[in-house]
């Protein structure tokens, strides 16, 4: 089984699931996001966002391929590039951290260690770029759009709560700890990265 993790670019954006290609939950603020959906332009907005981040900051995601079939992805960026992050009551993300926006592995490929490989690849990338941690806004109630990762799943793979909240806690993972992960976190990572399965709904927080 050949598996590759390739930086996300405009060339392979089409390999993301359709619902994710047209989702701008993180990339736009709530008002602009709803306007893009109403105008029928979310895919164009997504392309514009990725293009801008690539030019100004560099790689902001990975696409996972197994035998040349796309089976998952992860998106991350500094909070300055993630307008939606300011809408959360537990913002801002710490200045030494990058925001984990969303991630997903297709169910047929869970349980094969891909979750660990994805997060370790992101950790190595960000450590080289001088960041110490990755932070995420968790969904503590399990009722939000699927682009928000479940807080209990984040905790299960080593994230720690840095700002509690009944609905949207902010969690943090020190990047160096991910490089020594063992097999015992594999199942928890699969649950975490398999969480993005519902159709996301754009609505203000």
Image (spheres, rainbow, N blue to C red):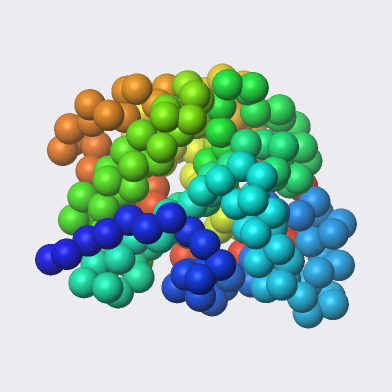
Can residue 171 be seen? no
Which residue is at the front of the view, 95 or 182?
95
User: Which residue in the rendered view is the most extreme toward the bottom?
Assistant: 40
Percent coordinates x, y for residue 56 in the rendering: 66, 45
Question: Left of 134 or right of it: where is 31?
Answer: right
* Residue 45 to residue 97: above or below: below
Percent coordinates x, y for residue 172 in the rendering: 50, 26
Question: Left of 49 or right of it: where is 75?
Answer: left
Can residue 58 be seen? yes
Question: Left of 74 or right of it: where is 82?
Answer: right
Percent coordinates x, y for residue 68 in the rendering: 27, 73
Question: Left of 82 or right of it: where is 154?
Answer: left
Residue visible at 72% across and 37% down? 80
Query: Which of the 4 image quarters holds residue 119?
Result: top left
Percent coordinates x, y for residue 183 in the rendering: 16, 38
* Residue 174 to residue 80: above or below: above
* Residue 114 to residue 85: above or below: below
* Residue 138 to residue 42: above or below: above
How many discs appear?
Answer: 0
Locate the N terminus by quadrant. bottom left
Residue visible at 67% across and 73% down? 43
User: Which residue in the rendered view is the most extreme toward the front?
Assistant: 55
User: Which residue in the rendered view is the most extreme toward the left?
Assistant: 1
Residue visible at 34% across and 47% down? 118
Residue visible at 42% across and 29% down? 128
């Amino acid at each position: 089984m050949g598996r590759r993790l390739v930086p996300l670019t405009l060339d392979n954006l089409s390999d993301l699931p359709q619902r994710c290609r047209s989702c701008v939950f993180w990339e736009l603020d709530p008002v602009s996001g709803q306007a893009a959906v109403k105008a029928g332009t979310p895919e164009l907005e997504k392309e514009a966002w990725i293009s801008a981040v690539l030019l100004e900051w560099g790689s902001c995601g990975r696409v996972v391929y197994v035998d040349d079939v796309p089976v998952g992805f992860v998106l991350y960026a500094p909070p300055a590039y993630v307008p939606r992050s300011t809408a959360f009551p537990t913002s801002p993300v710490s200045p030494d951290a990058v925001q984990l926006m969303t991630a997903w592995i297709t169910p047929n490929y869970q349980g094969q260690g891909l979750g660990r490989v994805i997060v370790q690849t992101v950790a190595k990338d960000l450590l080289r770029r001088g960041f110490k941690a990755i932070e995420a806004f968790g969904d503590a109630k399990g009722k939000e759009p699927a682009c928000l990762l479940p807080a209990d799943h984040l905790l299960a793979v080593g994230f720690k709560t840095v700002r509690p909240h009944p609905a949207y806690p902010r969690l943090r993972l020190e990047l160096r700890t991910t490089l020594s992960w063992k097999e015992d976190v594999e199942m928890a990572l699969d649950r975490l990265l398999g969480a993005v399965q519902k159709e996301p709904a754009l609505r203000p927080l």
